[in-house]
Image (tube, rainbow, N blue to C red):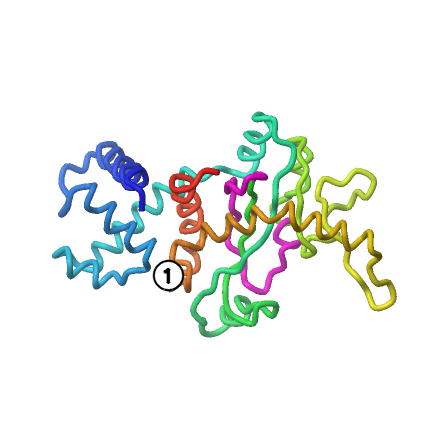
Amino acid sequence: MSAKTLTFVADLLRGHLKAIGSRWRKLPAGKIAVIVLAVLRHDQRLADMAGGNDVSPGTVRRWVQEVLRLLAARAPRLDRALAKIAKWGGEVVLIDGTLIRTERRSGKDNRKNYSGKHKTHGLLFLALTDTAGNLLWISAARPGRASEITTARHHNLVQKLRQAGLGALADLGFVGLDGDPDDPVVITGRKATRTQPLTTAQKQANQLINSERAPVEHAFADLKNWRILTKLRMDATQATMLLRALLVLTHSEITR
């Protein structure tokens, strides 16, 4: 972790403690920031971090939740993220989805979180990046069985892109998202069928789109460097807060 990120989290926590009038904590804000970042970056067990710092696991859990709430509150909303790109003169954003694995849940929650595409349990997230691969926005968590195109429609992505005057490049999972073939804002490749194989020109167009979309894959790789995402063990209802907090931390660590 960079000193910049550590200082950012510690200062954010100090400002929060001052705002709520908290005059005392078991450890100083800088040490709390180190503990929280260790949990997020390396997926350290709470009990291990507690034992090494002479606090209880419950205290470490409260610190992690507190910092996550502070960070997630700084994550940009979709419309504001798009307006910012348009203001800077951007014309295109990149969109893709990813599945974050979770523990297998019991009862009805087990079925809705199972992804037939990935053959595992998880939660689906959409993300937008600029053409350099910097994360701009991440969606709320959706059950693993949901599709990328349905999730994009749930967030009115096409409408908000039109309002911002931006276009988007996406993979084949988003084919059919934009219902205006004459003036599309979401550009995807073409799918082959049994009766209509792709022509040479269509294959070349798909390759070009895939090459232009490469930065969004790099952005997901940066996000998943936070090893807590290897397999979520926290409550799924808090996953959105976690991903948005990690987006803010990734911005602090990496800016292309």
x, y percent for residue 249: 38, 43
x, y percent for residue 60: 23, 54
How many residues crowd mark 1 within 10 Å: few (<14), some (14–19), many (20+)? Answer: few
State the extent of the magenta-drawn residues as a range: 130-152
Label total for image: 1
* Most foreground residue, 100 or 139: 100
Task: Find disc 1 in the rendering and name its residue.
Answer: 234
Q: Is residue 168 above or below residue 104?
A: above
Q: Is residue 193 above or below residue 37?
A: below
Q: Is residue 246 left or right of residue 210?
A: left
Q: Which residue is found at the position 41% from the left and 64% from the top?
A: 231
x, y percent for residue 162: 69, 35
Q: Quadrant of residue 187?
A: top right
Q: Which residue is found at the position 31% from the left and 50% from the top?
A: 65
Question: What kind of residue is marked 1?
Answer: Met
Q: Which residue is found at the position 27% from the left and 50% from the top?
A: 36
Give the SS element for disc 1. Answer: loop
